[in-house]
Amino acid sequence: MLNWGLIGPPMLAAFLASIVEGVEALTVVLAVGATRGWKSAVAGAVLALVVLLALVAILGPALALIPLKLLQIVVGTLLLLFGMRWLRKAILRAAGVLALHDEAAIYQTQTAAMRRREAGTGGWDSVAIATAFQITLLEGVEVVFIVIAVSAGGPGLLVPASLGATAAVALVVLLGLIVRQPLSRVPENTLKFVVGILLSAFGAFWAGEGLGVAWPGDDWSIPALVGGFAVVALVSVAGCRGMAARKAAAS
Amino acid sequence: MKRILDEAIGLFVDDGAFAIAIVICVAVVGALAAWAGALRLYCGPILFAGLAAILVESALRRARK
């Protein structure tokens, strides 16, 4: 019997984070494919996915060798740094302080940049392969970190988190194949907001566990932390929006 | 390679003061938990309150810029 209360949150965090990163990578791979040819663009992306899978296969089991308390402190702190950075950025974007991520504009810029580069001479286009490989690897490393970090909270979480990430990548690839355009309608900032809240909550809980904090209600503190960070984030959006409006009115 | 390294650091550090404040908050709660004995039950809420304050302050500071 699967314990969805245990595996559900890490799986959801990995799924949503992978959607965000997948959409960003897809935009560039589509631009490369449309301008330089699909064979090389897909080859670069697939090559990067193989490297990322190898990273998960090596790093995931290796975590079991690290003492649990130390692992919880290190991974918890890294999750806090990563998750709160995402959450802060999502708050500022939701408040209108920072511009939203514009996939269509990125696609246009990337397409123009690819057209300026010299065309490949043989069957394979090295510029296309390198560009697709680099973007898939860069965005994928974030996914790998999230999958490994959310799996570090307990035994048996690596597989569900990996499945969540794989399902997201498959969904993004499928949508990319169907629409052949950047997925501009995906509410990227809302997803980042939710993932930021989840990762911040996991990070606080695991760092606390590692440090010997006695959480009230034990594992039930995690939903409470999720709720707490959600309230703080929503209040911050309202505060930042007001601050930005006052600044605009004064200038 | 340099870009990948920069991206790896950028995964965790965007605003330096924000990142340092988070690490200090975790370290302070760690010291408190080691010292607090039976009062360790209060360390979790203190950790959350510290992190929440850091998040709100950093976001408002950026919005004020």
Image (cartoon, rainbow, N blue to C red):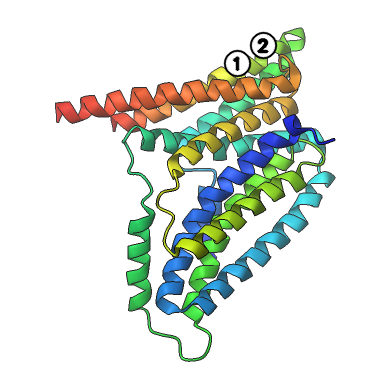
Disc 2 + disc 1, Cβ < 8 Å: yes
Image location (x, y in percent) of residue B3: 50, 61
Image location (x, y in percent) of residue B49: 55, 17
Image location (x, y in percent) of residue A148: 70, 46
Chain letter of mark 1 equals: B
In the picture of the structure, the residue carrying the numbered disc 2 is B42
Between the residue at mark 2 and the residue at mark 1, the CA separation in whole angstroms equals 6 Å
Do marks 2 and 1 both belong to one polypeptide chain?
yes
Residue A233 falls left or right of residue A153 = left
Looking at numbered disc 1 in the image, what kind of residue is underneath it? Ile
In the picture of the structure, the residue carrying the numbered disc 1 is B46
Say few, some or many: other residues with alpha carbon within 10 Å of mark 1 (under 14 / 14 to 19 / 20 or more). some
- For mark 1, give the secondary structure: helix
In the drawing, what numbered circle is on residue A67? none
Residue found at x 42% / y 73%: A34
Looking at numbered disc 2 in the image, what kind of residue is underneath it? Tyr
